[in-house]
């Protein structure tokens, strides 16, 4: 028989504060883990971070809120978002290295923060925060020669009619 897996339990700052208070009052970790349905490491982490939890609880005035991490370099994030959005609108294929390099260049020019490293981990988290999906792009940048595109469409239509091609016989091979 397989052991049942515990569900993920997220605590508010108020709940964490109550747990920390009970630990300081002398209750055992085992009792608290059974009562709240979490592992011993979760309660131990709360005991370790008790000062941070107390400060957050005092700052929130007892409101129910979870602790949230914020980015260290908010200006870099805003700029990187603007940069990627403008390139997407122009139809320019962008790569991971391009985003990382531009973030480092922007940071060094402004001297905003020395913390940013633009590592692959930073890029993955940035993509998740912004909802960016870097897919492999086949082909070229969006064409800016509209006249050549229109003439190609006309030539292709003539060829399709002349050769009596079906839709199954036509494919793009970049």
Image (cartoon, rainbow, N blue to C red):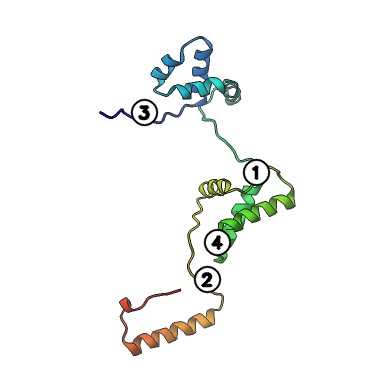
Which residue is at 38% across, 75% downward? 171
CA neighbours of label 4 inside 10 A, class few (<14), some (14 to 19), many (20+): few
State yes or no: discs 3 and 2 in contact (Cβ < 8 Å): no
Q: Which element is circle 1 on?
A: loop
Measured as percent of width and height from the top left, residue 11 is found at: 47, 26
State yes or no: discs 1 and 4 in contact (Cβ < 8 Å): no
Distance Cα–Cα, label 2 vs label 1:
33 Å
Q: Which element is circle 4 on?
A: helix
Q: Which element is circle 3 on?
A: loop
Q: Earlier in the sequence, mark 1 or mark 3?
A: 3
Q: Which residue is mark 3?
A: 6
State yes or no: discs 2 and 1 in contact (Cβ < 8 Å): no
Q: In the image, is residue 22 above or below residue 97?
A: above
Q: In the image, is residue 173 above or below residue 92?
A: below
Distance Cα–Cα, label 1 vs label 3:
36 Å
Measured as percent of width and height from the top left, residue 53 is found at: 56, 23
Q: Earlier in the sequence, mark 3 or mark 2?
A: 3
State yes or no: discs 3 and 4 in contact (Cβ < 8 Å): no
Q: Earlier in the sequence, mark 3 or mark 4?
A: 3
Which residue is at 42% across, 24% downward? 38
CA neighbours of label 3 inside 10 A, class few (<14), some (14 to 19), many (20+): few
Q: Which residue is mark 2?
A: 140
Q: Earlier in the sequence, mark 1 or mark 4?
A: 1
Q: Which residue is mark 1?
A: 73
Q: Which mark is residue 88?
A: 4
């Amino acid at each position: 028989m397989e052991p049942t897996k515990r569900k993920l339990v997220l605590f508010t700052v108020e709940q964490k504060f109550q747990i920390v208070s009970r630990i300081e009052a002398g209750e055992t970790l085992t009792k608290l883990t059974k009562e709240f349905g979490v592992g011993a490491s979760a309660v131990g982490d709360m005991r370790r971070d008790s000062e941070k939890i107390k400060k957050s609880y005092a700052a929130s005035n007892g409101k129910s809120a979870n602790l949230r991490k914020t980015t260290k370099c908010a200006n870099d994030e805003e700029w990187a978002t603007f940069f990627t959005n403008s390139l997407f609108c122009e139809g320019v294929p962008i790569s991971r290295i391009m985003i990382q390099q531009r973030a480092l260049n922007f940071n060094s020019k402004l001297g905003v923060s020395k913390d940013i490293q633009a590592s692959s981990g930073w890029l993955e988290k940035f993509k998740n925060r912004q909802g960016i999906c870097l897919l492999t792009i086949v082909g070229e940048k969006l064409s800016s020669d509209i006249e050549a595109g229109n003439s190609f469409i006309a030539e292709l239509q003539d060829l399709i009619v002349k050769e009596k091609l079906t839709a199954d016989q036509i494919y793009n091979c970049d």
